[in-house]
Image: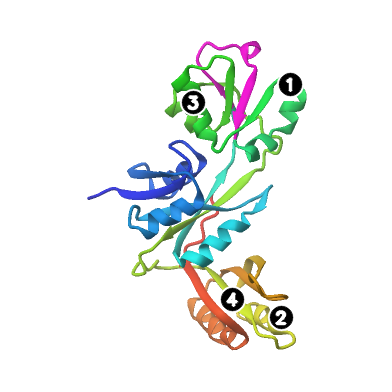
Amino acid sequence: MEKKRVAIQGIKASFHEEAAIKFFGEDIDTVECNSFKQTCEALKNKEADYAVMAIENSIAGSLLPNYTLLRDYHFTIIGEAYLHIQLNLLALPGVRFEDIKNVESHPIAIRQCDDFFNEYPHLNVVESSDTAACAKRIQDEQLRDTAAIANKLASQVYGLEIMERRIETNKKNYTRFLILTDNKDIVIDDANKASISFQVTDEVGSLVKVLNIFAEHNINMSKVQSMPVLGKRNQYNFYIDLEFSSHKEYQEAIRKALRYTVNFAIMGEYKKNDSV
């Protein structure tokens, strides 16, 4: 049986690969991409079977550009994965902390370690495009004056030692990832969660009516996100995650909601997965 090809933003041992392994298991072929758009292109061009895309972080909030990609590419969401983001200071084996002059990482990871850098103001902070790429560069170039902020997986893959563990300021840092496919034939049995998008009509109270329909059918709206419609004043796309126990109630609610919406789309029906 062929391995699943999974497109990720970043390189091996990045948080996106960690999320891919958590969802699919270790027997996958990772397709490394430089950007989220590139992961979408890899999926569209059949260079990958699936893509893993971060959509929100408990500290940084929603990744709004990725909602735009979801809208533009019309992929199907078949699952989700949550990662507890734990950040470590990594360096070559044998390097002492006092040897470190530079610390490299992704700008979001750097911001999430403010307390650590306040404690060691002499460290020169360098922003990079990917946490794992920083770890790989230290190993490739044998940099003994540089450390990386990355996950435990990066230390294992690139042969680095964990110099300081858990240096993130907020220990309750979680990222939610969506699992995407361009295969419209995949159906998830026993789905109890869905992601939908729509715009509402100009009728007064249209949005309230839609939200009330879901409430009346005992459907939990776990996420509501709005984004302006490009080029249209006072018009918005709404993205809503729905959690339900009865598929019949869910289908009935969707049927009723269609009366008050335009450009309605079910982006995916899948199993809720909030284990970390």
Q: Residue 198 carries which label?
A: 4
Q: Residue 137 carries which label?
A: 3
Q: How far apart are marks 1 and 2 (CA)?
A: 50 Å
Instruction: State yes or no: discs 3 and 1 in contact (Cβ < 8 Å).
Output: no
Q: Which mark is residue 120?
A: 1
Tag 1 or tag 3, which sits nearer the N-term? 1
Mark 1, residues whose alpha carbon is within 10 Å: few (<14), some, or many (≥20)? few
Q: Does the magenta stretch include residue 124?
A: no
Magenta part of the chain = 89-105
Tag 3 or tag 4, which sits nearer the N-term? 3
Residue 148's x, y, as percent? 57, 26
Q: Which residue is drawn at 64% across and 71% down?
A: 229
Q: Residue 208 carries which label?
A: 2
Residue 17's x, y, as percent? 45, 42
| Amino acid type assigned to the residue bearing label 2 in the image | Val
Residue 276 in sight: no
| Amino acid type assigned to the residue bearing label 1 in the image | Tyr
> Tag 1's secondary structure?
loop
Tag 2 or tag 3, which sits nearer the N-term? 3
| Amino acid type assigned to the residue bearing label 3 in the image | Arg
Q: With respect to residue 268, does 4 lie above or below?
A: above
